[in-house]
Amino acid sequence: MSNMVTIEGEVIHGAKLGRRMGFPTANMEVSGADIENGVYLSRVEIEGREYKAMSNVGVRPSVDGKCRLLETHIFDFQGDLYGQTLSVHLIRKIRDEKRFGSVEELRQQLESDFEQIRSL
C-alpha cells in the first residue's frame, strides 16, 4: 500500500481484550471504509503530538468476527480517549488479518507485529 489512508472517527468502547493482552487499543467503526483488512504501521495525532502506532482493520476473526473495526495501539501513550475524535493515518500494511487458534497465539503475533512496527 503506497498511498496513506486517513480514517477519522470517534473512539468507542471495545471488548478490552487488547488491554488484557498488554496492547490497549483505541477502537473506531470503519464499516464503509474502502481499505483492506490487515495490520498497519500507523500514526495518530493527539493534542498536537504525533505518535507511532499499530492498527488493525477488520472483523477480528479470532475473537467474535461480527463488526468491522479499526483498532489502534498507540506507542508510548497513556490516557483515556473514549468519545474523542481521532485521525489515524494508515501508512503501510504489514500483514493480512488472519484467524488464530487461541488468544495466546494472537498475543504472540501482536508482540511480533509490535516489534516489527517499532523498528520501522
Image (cartoon, rainbow, N blue to C red):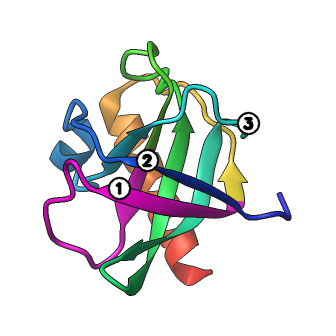
- The numbered mark, 1 or 2, whose residue comes first in the sequence reads 2
Q: Over which residues does the magenta segment extend?
A: 71-92
Disc tally is: 3
Decide: marks 1, 2 in contact (CB < 8 A)?
A: yes
Decide: marks 3, 1 in contact (CB < 8 A)?
A: no
Residue 35 is labelled as: none
Q: Where on the picture, by quarter, is residue 79?
A: bottom left
Figure check: 95 above or below 31: below
Image quadrant in which the N terminus is located: bottom right
Q: Position of residue 103 (x, y in %)?
A: 32, 31
Label 2 sits on a secondary structure element that is strand
Magenta span has 77? yes
User: Mark 1 highlights which residue?
Assistant: 85
Q: 102 or 64: which is nearer to us?
A: 64
User: Mark 2 highlights which residue?
Assistant: 9
Which residue is drawn at the image coordinates 41% and 37% (left, top)? 105
- The numbered mark, 3 or 1, whose residue comes first in the sequence reads 3
Q: Amino acid at mark 3?
A: Asp
Image quadrant in which the C terminus is located: bottom right
Which residue is drawn at the image coordinates 60% and 30% (left, top)? 98
Q: Amino acid at mark 2?
A: Gly
Circle 3 or circle 2, nearest the eye: 2
User: Rounded to the nearest whole Å, what is the CA distance between mark 3 and mark 2?
Assistant: 15 Å
User: Mark 3 highlights which residue?
Assistant: 34
Which residue is drawn at the image coordinates 14% and 60% (left, top)? 80
